[in-house]
Image (tube, rainbow, N blue to C red):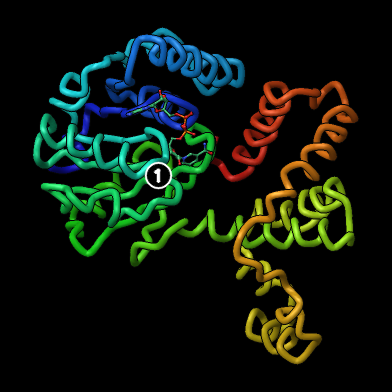
Amino acid sequence: MTLNDIKKVAGIGGGVIGGSWAVLFAMKGLKVTLFDINDDCIAADKKTIETNIDFLVENGAIKDKNAVLANISYTTSMEEAVKDAQFIQESGPERLNIKQDNLAKIEEFAPADAIFATSASGLPLGEITANAVHPERCVGGHPYNPPHLIPLVEITKTEKTDPKVVELAKEFYQSIGKEAVVLHKDCPGYICNRLQLAVFREAIDLVKRGVCSVEDVDKALTFGPGIRWAIFGHNMIMQLGNKDGISGMIDMLGGGYNLCADIAAWDTIPADYGKIAQEQVDEMMKNFSDEIGHDNASISKYRDKMLIEILKLHGKF
Ligand SMILES: NC(=O)c1ccc[n+]([C@@H]2O[C@H](COP(=O)([O-])OP(=O)(O)OC[C@H]3O[C@@H](n4cnc5c(N)ncnc54)[C@H](O)[C@@H]3O)[C@@H](O)[C@H]2O)c1
């Protein structure tokens, strides 16, 4: 199979992620059949998809809403969803047994060379595909939410994945505008969720140690590193921060105060942090301007509008 052969995608699960992938595939001209477990779920998926499309229409990325909608069909039959698909994007719940069961059903009905890509955000691909009949065509295709806006996809593989499948999956994602990174080996949490958790662990620790408030830790991230990270990754930022480049920066950091020894190292998320943070986040939301909004739906919309401005600067929207 080559890139030109990929014309039909099966989406398995149409929630936050599946409903976003479906829009991206459909707006790029691919036919999508979306599987969900019952009619109520499909009704919810249709709403998610319509909201995503409306947002893209409002912001000029989609001209013809009906043409995009016409590329998406819905089914509660796994056979119907995958029987003539060349690419399968699985976005069901993050539960190992569900992912394994779905893969078994997919293998029953899908063409043997159809690529299986899971959106799983933490489960190692090796565990999801442990019982696969065709592990050679299985990859992880981990998006960043929402995939119809954020370019990154992390591609994972196992030692059984055919390198040609990895290459084709990468080519496919790139053909629909994604920035794809391929991990050299299977690793829980992949790249981004590990990085994100490392930062979040320290953020939680700073609040719990009484160093700063939840609001200030967010403000520090947004108006400090976050604004630079929207342009370059941390290695490049380090390169630009020292006259001798990143190697000079490492020498400087190594010779200075050993902050590494003071960084949070605990191995489970403190259960009481949810309550501590929720109270402060609720207060932050109350104090936001009306332009940003005061509830999750309007604040998400504001976030996505800002994302579009950043994507435009990168030539990605
Ligand atoms: N939400 C995120 O930020 C995010 C980001 C990247 C990856 N992911 C991953 O994407 C996947 C989906 O997450 P989500 O946030 O969209 O969840 P979600 O709960 O919004 O959606 C799950 C979807 O799966 C459907 N579903 C339920 N049982 C199913 C089954 N047995 N088989 C198939 N589908 C079933 C649901 O009806 C729903 O449409 C997970 O693996 C998650 O870890 C999530």
x, y (%) of residue 217?
82, 53
Vertical side of 276 occupied by 225: above or below: below
Vertical side of 104 occupied by 69: above or below: above
Q: Residues within 10 Å of mark 1 (few under 14, many from 20)?
A: many
- Name the quadrant containing residue 56: top right
x, y (%) of residue 300?
67, 28
Whether residue 160 is visible, yes or no, is yes
Whether residue 64 is visible, yes or no, is no
- Name the quadrant containing residue 173: top left
x, y (%) of residue 269?
64, 56
x, y (%) of residue 131?
17, 49
Answer with left or right where residue 42 lies relative to residue 129.
Answer: right
Answer with left or right where residue 162 lies relative to residue 216.
Answer: left
Ligand 1 positioned in quadrant:
top left
- Name the quadrant containing residue 212: bottom right
Which of 68/100 is in front?
A: 100
Residue occupying the point 34% across, 40% down: 175
Residue occupying the point 76% across, 85% down: 258
Task: Please name the amino acid that badge 1 sits on.
Answer: Ala
Which of 243/267 is in front?
A: 267
Q: Which residue is mark 1?
A: 120
Residue occupying the point 67% across, 25% down: 301
Beta carbon of the mark 1 residue lies under 8 A of ligand 1: yes
Q: Tag count in the figure?
A: 1
Vertical side of 296 occupied by 164: above or below: below
